[in-house]
Image: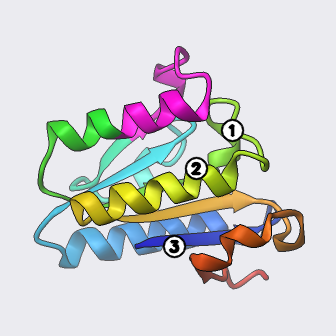
Amino acid sequence: MVNLIVGHKGTGKTKMMIDLANNRAERSDGHVVFINKNQRLMYDLIHEIRVVCMEDYDEITNSDEYVGFLYGIISSDHDIDAIFIDSILKHADVNTEDIPEFLARLKVISEQHDIDFIVSLSADLDELSSEIQDFTLLKPQGC
């Protein structure tokens, strides 16, 4: 399953992601991965969560490379239950036009490997393509 958290900056998306990730890690038999732009959130997440900071991977410059990176993470750990991707538009030059195809690819990965994806987007829902209607929308409390 692919879940989206959509809203403008300051609406509580990251706080919601942290809470969801911590809760998931506490109740899951599998592993949880949290992908963030930098190290900033490392201490807000419980130690069972694998934190990946994209600043360490400058060579990933587009959504194709990003998907390949996700496959690499998955292939190295077959016990992953959920992958949280915070602020995808700040990673690897992904832009709003890339989002529908990127999410469709995540959906395929999710179904193939039985992994839930929770992705946050700093955007207005109206700015995004109607193609994202196929995905579950979670609303931060600030929206």
Q: Check the image and report above or below for 57 versus 44.
A: above
Q: Earlier along the polypeptide chain: callout 2 or callout 3?
A: 3
C-beta proximity under 8 Å, tags 1 and 3 = no
Q: Residues within 10 Å of mark 1 (few under 14, many from 20)?
A: some
Left or right relative to 73: residue 130: right
* Residue at image location 58% in from the left, 35% down from the top: 63
Q: Check the image and report above or below for 131 versus 136.
A: above
Q: Which of these two is toward me, 43 or 28?
A: 28
Q: Secondary structure at mark 1?
A: loop
* Residue at image location 24% in from the left, 44% down from the top: 74
Give the magenta part as a residue range: 52-70
Work out how far the residue at label 2 is from the one at label 3, CA to CA, in angstroms: 13 Å
C-beta proximity under 8 Å, tags 1 and 2 = yes
Q: Name the residue carrying label 3.
A: 3
* Residue at image location 49% in from the left, 34% down from the top: 66
Q: Earlier along the polypeptide chain: callout 1 or callout 2?
A: 1
Amino acid carrying label 1: it is Val
Amino acid carrying label 3: it is Asn
| Place of residue 119 in the rendered image (x, y in percent of width and height, measured from the top left) | 55, 61
| Place of residue 5 in the rendered image (x, y in percent of width and height, measured from the top left) | 63, 71
Which numbered circle lies on residue 102?
A: 2
Q: Secondary structure at mark 2?
A: helix
Is residue 3 visible from the viewing direction of this image? yes
